[in-house]
Amino acid sequence: MKNAARELHIPLEAGASTTAIIYAASQPPRAALVLAHGAGANQRSVFMVEFAATLAGLGLDVITFNFSYMEAGRRMPDRSPVLETCYRAVVELVARELTSARRLFIGGKSMGGRIATQVAAADPDLAIAGLVLLGYPLHPPGRPSSRRDAHLPSVGRPMLFVQGSRDGFGTPQELEPVLDRLSPRPTL
């Protein structure tokens, strides 16, 4: 039987806070996944809720959260350092609070996945088993030369890229040569 989702309040810098939702595994959890939303929709978007609930039904504890700009009701994402600080705060709390986090994965949809890779690349000692990236934003739409992949070789962990063939931020064909250079070799 599936457990109901529960909320956690996570303190951030300068008195700010954010909310995370834990979708508890419907069976003894095999691992935990922290999953961040994209730039335009929060953790309560249909996609995020359905994806998290489906994975929880398959035996993962899934934790979604709002970046602080979204929690505050702003539309414009914060700069990367602020997003990364928020992401790290969520990871640290989850690692302390959930026993399933002994096998912790991080990731996200679009911008949330990019921030997860930046957090992983910046800290090789961060205890994460791998990354799950849903629609990785390799470049801004219509600007394939403005790449967002320079940090990916520093991730150094298994990565799963789920990429649509019509994604304006980068197709699987655009990602393949990038992934060929990484170790361990990501799954696309």
Image (cartoon, rainbow, N blue to C red):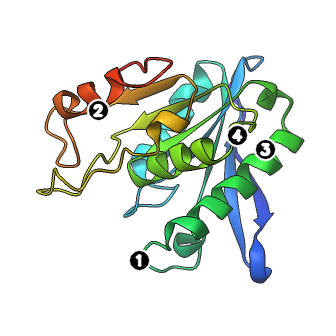
Badge 4: few (under 14), some or many (20 or more) residues near its Cα, within 10 Å? few
Q: Are marks 2 and 1 in contact (CB under 8 Å)?
A: no
Instruction: Give the Cα separation between the discs numbered 4 and 3.
Output: 17 Å
| Mark 2 vs 4, N-terminal side | 4
Residue at 55% across, 35% down? 155
Q: Is residue 127 left or right of residue 53?
A: right
Q: Secondary structure at mark 3?
A: helix
Judging depth in this view, the residue of 28 and 17 nearest the camera is 17
The quadrant in which residue 138 appears is top left
The quadrant in which residue 10 appears is bottom right
Judging depth in this view, the residue of 67 and 29 nearest the camera is 67
Q: Are marks 1 and 4 in contact (CB under 8 Å)?
A: no
Instruction: Give the Cα separation between the discs numbered 2 and 3.
Output: 27 Å
Q: Is residue 119 left or right of residue 43?
A: right
- Which residue is disc 4 drawn over? 4
Which dot, 2 or 4, sits closer to the camera? Answer: 2
Kind of residue at disc 1:
Arg
Which dot, 4 or 3, sits closer to the camera? Answer: 3
Residue at 67% across, 50% down? 21
| Mark 2 vs 1, N-terminal side | 1
In the image, is residue 160 above or below residue 75?
above
Rendered location of residue 53, percent (x, y): 55, 34
Residue at 66% across, 25% down? 129
Residue at 22% across, 29% down? 172
- Which residue is disc 2 drawn over? 163
Rendered location of residue 57, percent (x, y): 59, 23
